[in-house]
Amino acid sequence: MIVSIAAQKGGVGKSSMSLHLSGVLAENNEKVLLCDVDPQASLSSTFIDDVYSLDKALKDLLLDPDLSASEVLSKTKFENIDIIPSNLSLGLSEFELLSNPDSQYLLSDKLDEVKQDYHTVLIDCPPSLGIFTRLALVASDYVLIPLECSPYAVKSTVFLLEMINRVRKRANPQLEVLGFVINKIDARRRIEQDYNSLIREHFKDKVFKTELKDSVKYAEAVALKIPISFYQRKSEQAESYRQLLKEIEDARIAF
């Protein structure tokens, strides 16, 4: 399956969620391909020391019709985790993509070449609803939406859901929202408890039961460039991602 991790708001943990989910997939001996469609390249930088030294990156894959995904993807130091990396040069391709009426299908076509080699493809989206997020949604089977318990959580998500509905109408009718993930929550704060209740009331059973706490261990794992399930295998934080993956798999089966 191909899953986009998307949110209009920055800082909600899309890249770290991609990293940690890839870890729990890999520890189950499931091959996962990460695809970084964010020009900031945070996810790529986690796995590759110098993303600017790459011979080929996502920009080249999208703009060169003769280039295959297998020629661009990079192996990582973690068995079962590969990545199609990005860097700031991806932003330079935006004008060319916008001027091509078929550009929204480019990523989908490229991933079709390799998706059968992986149990899961995770696409890390930028914090915007521009062309790169659209490419990701058109290429995906599902969308996973991280949310913080903040005033803008529901408001910003409304626009993303509108975009998903537009993509469904023509470009990708099979696209489904897997669910919403409450991320970086500190349940000791009353205001976060209130927004948690608001989110669950608004999106109902589409919100996963697993909540990812605001924890320094996640930040340490990202800083060390290691998925949490490899960094602290027996930690509460690693177990939370295992529980989240179980819910994701159950939601997918339900479709």
Image (cartoon, helix red, strand yellow):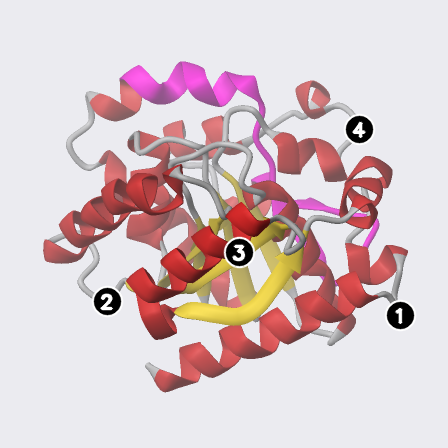
Q: In the depicted view, which residue is nearer to us: 103 or 25?
A: 25
Residue denoted by label 2: 174
Q: Earlier in the sequence, mark 3 or mark 1?
A: 3
Tell me the element at label 3. Answer: helix
Magenta stretch contains residue 16: no
Q: CA distance from mark 4 to mark 1?
A: 27 Å
Tell me the element at label 4. Answer: loop
Label 2 or label 3, whichever lies nearer to me, is: 3
* Residue 174, quarter of picture: bottom left
Q: For the residue marked with disc 1, what is the amino acid?
A: Lys
180 versus 103 height, above or below: below
Label 3 or label 1, whichever lies nearer to me, is: 3
Q: In the depicted view, which residue is nearer to us: 12 or 135?
A: 12
Q: Residue 107 in the image: x percent, y percent?
A: 37, 44
Q: Earlier in the sequence, mark 4 or mark 3?
A: 4
| Callouts 1 and 2 close, C-beta under 8 Å | no
Residue denoted by label 4: 49
Residue for point 59% across, 63% down: 211
Q: CA distance from mark 4 to mark 3?
A: 38 Å
Q: Residues within 10 Å of mark 4 (few under 14, many from 20)?
A: few
Residue for point 48% across, 62% down: 115
The answer to whether residue 32 is left or right of residue 155 is: right
Give the magenta-colored segment's residue range: 72-95
Residue for point 36% across, 34% down: 132
Residue denoted by label 3: 193
Q: Earlier in the sequence, mark 4 or mark 1?
A: 4
* Residue 91, quarter of picture: top left
Label 1 or label 2, whichever lies nearer to me, is: 1
